[in-house]
Image (cartoon, rainbow, N blue to C red):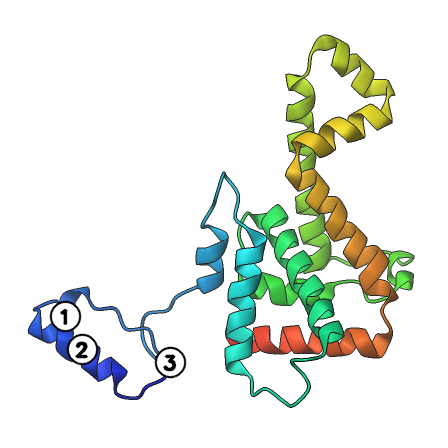
Amino acid sequence: TAKPDEKDMWVDYCRQANRLDDLIIVEPGGKHFFNFLQYESENRVGGTSITENIVQVLKTVIQSSEEKTKGKSDDSFWENALDMLIFNSIDLCKLAYGSVTVSQLYSIVQTAPRQKEDFKKEPKPNTWLHAIDLATTNSMRQIDALKESLSTEDQERWKVDDVFKEKIASENLPDYVTLHTVNDFFIDTYTFLAEKTRSIIEFCFSGFLFRLKN
């Protein structure tokens, strides 16, 4: 709530109902906190959390924390570019860790490759690379399990027919498809953005996350 007297009103309600022991107050400087990203990312439907829901929750918090400047909300390019960064960073967190936290998102954005030349150098350990490695390992486990579930004939075909392998994996493993999308974004889209454009998008997202993680 944004109303200054709202807290006192609910405390009074709980006191009258003899429910003060059931009251949890989340406020700056208080002893309780609510990790909204972790809650939403662990709220699973059909065994998986819905990225769209997590993105909308995060964008709602971002929008409520900033003073809207004239024309900014109407600039669809910046909003779409920011959405792509948010979506793919969240998907990478889910694929790697199974949930989403502010600290993980912040570190991924801060360490993601910024230009094609970064891939030609000896990769330095960082959060983005670690997340990609974990996501790839998790995907490979799913692929191995899928292969073992196939008939003997299909397993033999799997070994020699890459088109068949890709088709079966894409049709049965949503995480496999998502990982390809995430890789394509960071490697083929994010690194090709103009430096100024990428810096603005990154600063907008990571600047907000920095306030939350602290």
| Along the viewing direction, whichever of 103 and 181 lies nearer the viewer | 181
Circle 2 residues within 10 Å: few <14, some 14–19, many ≥20 = some
Q: Secondary structure at mark 1?
A: helix
Which secondary structure lies at badge 3? Answer: loop
Q: Farthest residue in the top direction?
A: 152
* Closer mark to the observer between disc 3 and disc 2: 2
For the residue pair 58 and 130, the one nearer the viewer reads as 58
Residue at screen point 85% across, 27% down: 163
Tell me, yes or no, whether the two marked residues, 1 and 3, touch with CB atoms within 8 Å: no
Mark number displayed over residue 1? none
State the residue at coordinates (78%, 56%): 185
Q: Report the residue marked by disc 3.
A: 28
Q: Amino acid at mark 3?
A: Pro
Q: Residues within 10 Å of mark 1 (few under 14, many from 20)?
A: some
Number of marks drawn: 3
Residue wearing tag 2: 11
- Is 3 rendered above or below residue 91? below
Residue underneath mark 1: 20
Q: Position of residue 81 (x, y in %)?
A: 74, 68
Picture quarter containing residue 148?
top right
153 to the left or right of 98: right
How far apart marks 1 and 3 lie (CA) works out to 20 Å
Of badges 1 and 3, nearer the viewer stands: 1
